[in-house]
Image (tube, rainbow, N blue to C red):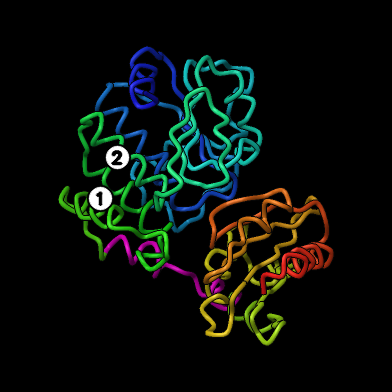
Amino acid sequence: MAVEQLDSSIKNSKNILLVSHINPDGDTLGSMCGMYSLIKDNYKKICDMVAVSKIPEVYKFLPNIDNVKNIGEMDLSREYDLVINLDVAAIDRCADAQILFDKAKCSVNIDHHETNNNYGKINIVEPFASATGEVLFRLCLDLKWKVSLDSAICLYSAIVTDTGCFKFSNTTPRTMEYSGKLLAYGIDPSDIYKKCYESSSKDMVLFQSYCINKAKFLNNDKIAYTIVYKRDLEKFNCNGEDFTDGLTEKLRAIVSTQIAFVVKELHSGSSKVSMRSKSIDIAQICAALGGGGHKFAAGALIKANPEKAVKMILNEIENRKLC
């Protein structure tokens, strides 16, 4: 039903906006740019796209990424016929773009997070999917959409980045089946891997080495965490780039670690938390702190300084006897 409603909504809309989440990753950007191509190729319509924070350099290779506008360029008083959120687990994750989503004649929520509460007028949410890019390819099959090479690159990149190049536990037989079908459109998987995983700057590598070196370990090394302060980002010339991307996974990779998290100090006085686990459900921890995500990969925005945020996280872990 929702799939047919999406098809009808696109057909009947004169102006469409695609929205990615704050601190964009490969899935939200790949899904947004992929949806842009799919709508252009199948409905002959050009969408607006918006990012509510800076796009990381690593994803600048995505087709159509140059057409993405910053939220500061948008007319927030405009009423779109259709606004589609892509990979936005909760409505507040699209930050200032929420006003455009709320005002739209029709709003669509396409996602794969378990904590998504179906906040759109039309909701296509598959918690069992590895990535929103995977959900979109299922739509391609159901609606018999034409898939161009540009669309395939975007959707494949979305899946690759949200599965950690198919090594995370969210990788399923369907994930591999869909990825294989996307490769058939002429994608070079080696090239995409290099662009996503072998394009780190010297400053980023040194920064992450510094953060890991000052990590703290608790409960017989079952818990590993590090704090990233604003001064750390300035010291390594981060220039607005999210140098913390992938840092939590590096801590989780330690053989003894069961729960790993990174707490990043924000200019607002709040802290951004990224949490990963090997086998413990950490979505419940992040949900209790106002965030959410997946069972083994979740996050939250906490209105507290980093030290207090760490205490709140550790208290949740202890109170729930998780580790």
Judged by its main secondary structure, the magenta piece is helix
Image coords of residue 157 (percent x, y): 35, 53
Q: What segment is highlighted magenta in the picture?
A: 191-207
- Residue hosting label 1: 178
Q: Amino acid at mark 1?
A: Tyr
Image coords of residue 251 (percent x, y): 58, 77
Q: Which mark is residue 96?
A: none
Q: Is residue 81 above or below residue 202?
A: above
Q: Are marks 2 and 1 in contact (CB under 8 Å)?
A: yes
- Residue hosting label 2: 138
Q: Is residue 293 left or right of residue 60?
A: right
Q: Is residue 58 above or below residue 86?
A: below
Element assignment for label 2: helix
Image coords of residue 250 (percent x, y): 53, 75
Report the residue at 37% width, 12% height from top. Answer: 12
Image coords of residue 163 (percent x, y): 40, 60
Quadrant in which the C terminus appears: bottom right
